[in-house]
Image (spheres, grey):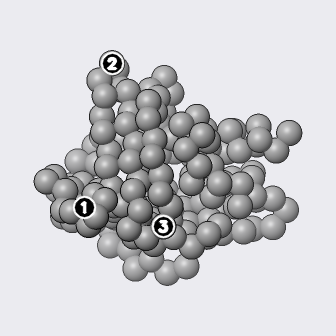
Amino acid sequence: MDLDLNPELDLVLTRELNAPRNLLYTCWTTPEHLVHWFVPKPHKVTSCHLDVRPGGACNTTFEVDGNLMENKGVYLEVVPNEKLVFTDTYTAGWKPAPEPFMTAIVTFEDLGGGRTRYTAVARHRNAEAAQTHKDMGFHDGWGTVATQLETYAKGLMK
């Protein structure tokens, strides 16, 4: 899947996960599952509203060190079991966000044998925003979340 990456704007994490892509996609698109793995522990998701369709809401609230962080956005593209694209540039009803940060592109590629190539791209509007996200720990944080996703999905397979 060609994403036309720009190294100045796009941060990329790719992992091979030991879980089938349909299950990983379900974990990404079902609030009851997403709350268990979506932020690095010990932080947690305190609320989640997902309307998984282009233009549908993608809203989460995290608790990080006792502080609540709201993330409101919309889905731009949804290809079941293959790709999710969502952004905080807009909120529901295509209302522009006052301080957009990024667009996320998450892909799930079937590798066979219950394995999936999982790629998460955080695309930013400028190099400064990308550097800020990198300095915030994008690779460690999103890597931890990928591991938590894999562990959670494997637990559902039992």
Q: In which quarter of the image is residue 35?
A: top right
Give the answer, above or below, for where 97 lies relative to 62.
below
Whether label 2 touches label 1, CB < 8 Å: no
Identified at 50% across, 27% down, the residue is 41
The residue identified by callout 2 is: 66
Q: Secondary structure under badge 1?
A: loop
In the rendered image, which residue does mark 3 sit on? Answer: 53
| Residue 108 seen in the figure | yes
Of marks 2 and 3, the one in the foreground: 3
In the rendered image, residue 78, in percent from the top left (x then y), is placed at 51, 70
Label count reads 3
- Asked if disc 3 and disc 1 are in contact, CB closer than 8 Å, the reply is no
Q: Earlier in the sequence, mark 2 or mark 3?
A: 3
Residues 9 and 96: in front is 96
Q: Going by the picture, which residue comes out furthest to the left?
A: 98
Quadrant including the C terminus: top right
Of the residues shown, which amino acid type is indicated by label 3?
A: Arg
The residue sitting at 38% across, 68% down in the picture is 55
- Closest to the observer: 84 or 126? 84
- Residue, x 44% and y 35% (percent of image)? 47
Q: Tag 1: residue type?
A: Thr
Secondary structure of the residue carrying numbered label 3: loop
Quarter of the figure that contains the N terminus: bottom right
At label 1, counting other C-alpha atoms closer than 10 Å, the crowd grade (few under 14, some 14-19, many 20 or more) is: some
**Residue 94: x, y in percent?**
26, 66
- Mark 1 — residue? 89
SS at mark 2? loop
Q: Distance between the residues labelled 2 and 3?
A: 32 Å
* Residue type marked 2: Gly
Does residue 8 appear in this view? Answer: no
158 left or right, relative to 2: right
Q: How far apart are marks 2 and 1 (CA)?
A: 26 Å
